[in-house]
């Protein structure tokens, strides 16, 4: 059998393209943060993870440009060999301080951070415990390890305890959860989870890709709940609030040192380029200097949740700048996306397996740099489209 036969048989995306409702890989001509240009048409962007709006911040742009001038465009090697700059180590030191840990380690992407950290820690006699709504990079990191994977229902503490209780005491245990869940915008109950982790001698790792810069005055979900000392590892990415590309994990000195010398995703991958490291560092400095950005994005999210709820949309359990518009079917999700796009609003349609069947949704997300006028326009367009497609 030809291994490429599955490629020829896959026609779903081509059919969507031909029908004019294909919502992915849209080539933007310009990206100004809260607005983008597609084929000469301006759209309000509410589908970005640029939560603090720092991708266009003058200090972040300048830092990236200056790094290219000083260091060039690439480190041309892995962190393990020739690819470590003093800039990387400065970034790691400041990140560790920011999230309240002894040490941090920078990877080339957020996904590689999870792949490298989780797979290096979870050995043959170990068990990794995952929330069923955990991000794909967490799941893939667990699969790369040689240990056993156990999963519990989303944010279900009783089910989590049953799973933890069923694991032999002789096994090493790593509980990994998102701090802020990226599709529906709810938070993991970290205070209760940290107590269960201690009770059953498990270590707790939090992926705070979407919470960093947003929750806890920018320091993340663990800080928001006041449990930084009870969370063993804090991971985040640079491709969201940090307005760059890369990722990091922070924890105690010994654990980070071990990951640094055993994570294949770090050792066998080229290091984060100078411009990206400098941009992430500059973004971190802006977070410290302008804490109002974190408060501003949460205030905008509060306003939009209120607006969507008053219109009659189902927004689930969101309490963050990620606000889902839950629709429940593939066809209606794509039709609503298309009409919003044509009316000047850029959102992200999300269907199974990214969400459970019956939870298909439009993922909306907000930036500290959105204006009141833009938010008014978005709500007006959603009201118009929602009535047209029968959601309201």
Image: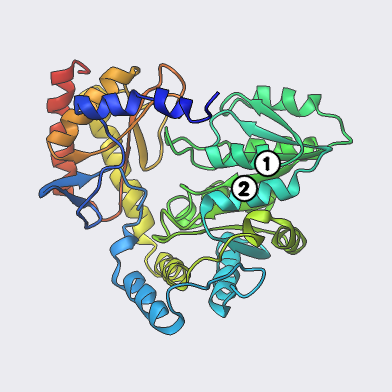
Q: Nearer the viewer, residue 217 or 345?
A: 345
Relative to residue 108, is residue 73 drawn left or right?
left
Which image quadrant for residue 275? bottom left
**Are circles 1 and 2 on residues that touch, CB within 8 Å?**
yes
Q: Can residue 76 be seen in this view?
A: yes
Relative to residue 157, is residue 347 drawn left or right?
left
* Label 2: which secondary element: helix
Q: Nearer the viewer, residue 71 or 282?
A: 71
Task: Give residue 58's mark.
Answer: none
The residue singled out by tag 1 in the image is 144
| The C terminus: image quadrant | top left
Q: Can residue 379 be seen in this view?
A: no
- Disc 2 crowd rating (10 Å Cα; few below 14, some 14-19, many 20+) is many
Relative to residue 337, is residue 145 drawn left or right?
right
Relative to 278, residue 320 above or below: above
The residue singled out by tag 2 in the image is 115
Query: Can you give x and y, in whole percent of width and height, for residue 360 in the image?
Result: 37, 23
Relative to 203, residue 287 above or below: below
Label 1 to label 2: alpha-carbon separation:
7 Å
Query: Can you give x and y, in whole percent of width and height, for residue 29 in the image?
Result: 19, 54
Query: Can you give x and y, in whole percent of width and height, for residue 318 in the image?
Result: 40, 33
């Amino acid at each position: 059998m030809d291994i490429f036969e599955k490629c020829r048989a896959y026609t779903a995306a081509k059919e969507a393209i031909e029908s004019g409702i294909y919502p992915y890989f849209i080539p933007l001509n310009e990206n100004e943060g809260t607005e983008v240009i597609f084929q000469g048409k301006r759209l309000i962007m509410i589908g970005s993870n640029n939560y603090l709006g720092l991708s266009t911040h003058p200090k972040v742009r300048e830092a990236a440009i200056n790094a290219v001038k000083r260091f060039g465009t690439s480190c041309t090697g892995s962190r393990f060999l020739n690819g470590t700059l003093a800039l990387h180590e400065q970034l790691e030191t400041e990140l560790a301080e920011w999230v309240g840990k002894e040490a941090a380690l920078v990877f080339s992407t957020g996904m590689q951070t999870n792949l490298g950290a989780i797979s290096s820690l979870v050995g043959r006699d170990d068990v990794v415990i995952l929330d069923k709504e955990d991000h794909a990079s967490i799941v893939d990191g667990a699969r790369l390890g040689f240990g056993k994977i156990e999963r519990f229902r989303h944010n279900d503490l009783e089910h989590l305890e049953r799973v933890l209780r069923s694991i032999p005491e002789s096994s090493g245990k790593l509980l990994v959860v998102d701090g802020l869940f990226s599709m529906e915008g709810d938070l993991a109950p970290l205070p209760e989870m940290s107590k269960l982790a201690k009770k059953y001698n498990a270590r707790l790792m939090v992926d705070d890709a979407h919470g960093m810069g947003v929750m806890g005055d920018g320091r993340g979900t663990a800080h928001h709940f006041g449990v930084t000392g009870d969370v063993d590892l804090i991971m985040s990415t640079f491709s969201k609030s940090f307005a760059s590309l890369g990722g990091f994990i922070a924890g105690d000195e010994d654990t980070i040192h071990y990951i640094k010398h055993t994570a294949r995703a770090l050792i066998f991958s080229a290091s984060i380029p100078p411009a990206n490291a400098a941009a992430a560092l500059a973004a971190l400095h802006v977070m410290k200097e302008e804490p109002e950005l974190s408060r501003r994005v949460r205030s905008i999210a509060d306003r939009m949740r209120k607006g969507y709820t008053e219109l009659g949309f189902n927004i689930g359990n969101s309490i963050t700048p990620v606000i889902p518009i839950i629709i429940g079917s593939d066809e209606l999700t794509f039709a609503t996306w298309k009409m919003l796009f044509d009316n000047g609003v850029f959102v992200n349609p999300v269907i199974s397996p990214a969400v459970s069947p019956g939870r298909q949704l439009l993922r909306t997300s907000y930036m500290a740099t959105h204006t009141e006028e833009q938010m008014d326009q978005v709500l007006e367009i959603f009201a118009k489209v929602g009535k047209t497609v029968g959601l309201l």
